[in-house]
Image: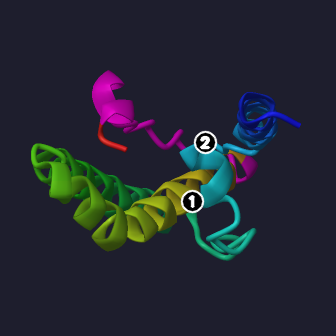
Amino acid sequence: MSNVKRRLRRFAVIAALAAALSGCAMSDDSMARFVVAPDKYLLYNCEEIAREAKTAAAREQELHRLMVRASADPAGRLVSGIAYDSDYLTVRGELNELRAAAVSKHCEPVPDVAAPANAGAVR
């Protein structure tokens, strides 16, 4: 086989693998489900759910600000991924569980404090 054909074949294999693996990408909320125990807030009453949601939402906003600030520098993206991603996913998972607990107990809904639209640029 000629050198050009080998290179084309290698490129085709790499492209096929990349296309197959791109389907494995998960959103933050999907990954957050794996980080927080289901029914973590099962025994909480509405007042406790509201208090925990307020704390979690404040932490989410703080982490988002830190991630945006770190992403201003090319090396900061790596640092942000190492330092903040796991905490951010945990907080997102907790907020999802708090929303589910509020719905199941007929409490006031937990507001969605999702990151601004440009949050995807951070990651």
Q: Quadrant of the N terminus?
A: top right
Three-letter code for the amino acid on which mark 1 is drawn:
Gly
Find the magenta span and give its range: 104-121
Say which element carries label 2.
Answer: loop
Rendering coords of residue 61 (x, y %): 25, 49
Q: Is residue 1 left or right of residue 91?
A: right
Q: Is residue 62 left or right of residue 98?
A: left
Residue shown at 37%/61% (left/top)? 56
Q: Is residue 56 left or right of residue 62?
A: right
Q: Is residue 99 visible?
A: no
Q: Is residue 90 positioned above or below 30 on the image? A: below
Q: Is residue 71 left or right of residue 45?
A: left
Query: Which residue has dot 1 on it?
Result: 93
Graded by Cα atoms within 10 Å as few (under 14), some (14 to 19) or many (20 or more), the crowding at tag 2 reads few
Q: Is residue 122 visible?
A: yes
Dot label at residue 83: none
List the single residue furthest toward the front: 2
Residue shown at 49%/60% (left/top)? 89
Most foreground residue, 45 or 63: 63
Label 2 close to label 1 by CB (< 8 Å): no
Mark found first going from the N terminus, 2 or 1 = 2
Rendering coords of residue 14 (x, y %): 73, 40
Q: Any magenta on residue 115?
A: yes
Query: Which residue has dot 2 on it?
Result: 27
Q: Foreground mark, 2 or 1?
A: 2
The rendered magenta stretch, by its main secondary structure, is classed as: loop
Residue shown at 66%/45% (left/top)? 26
Q: Where on the picture, by quarter, is residue 106? A: top right
Q: Where on the picture, by quarter, is residue 62? A: bottom left
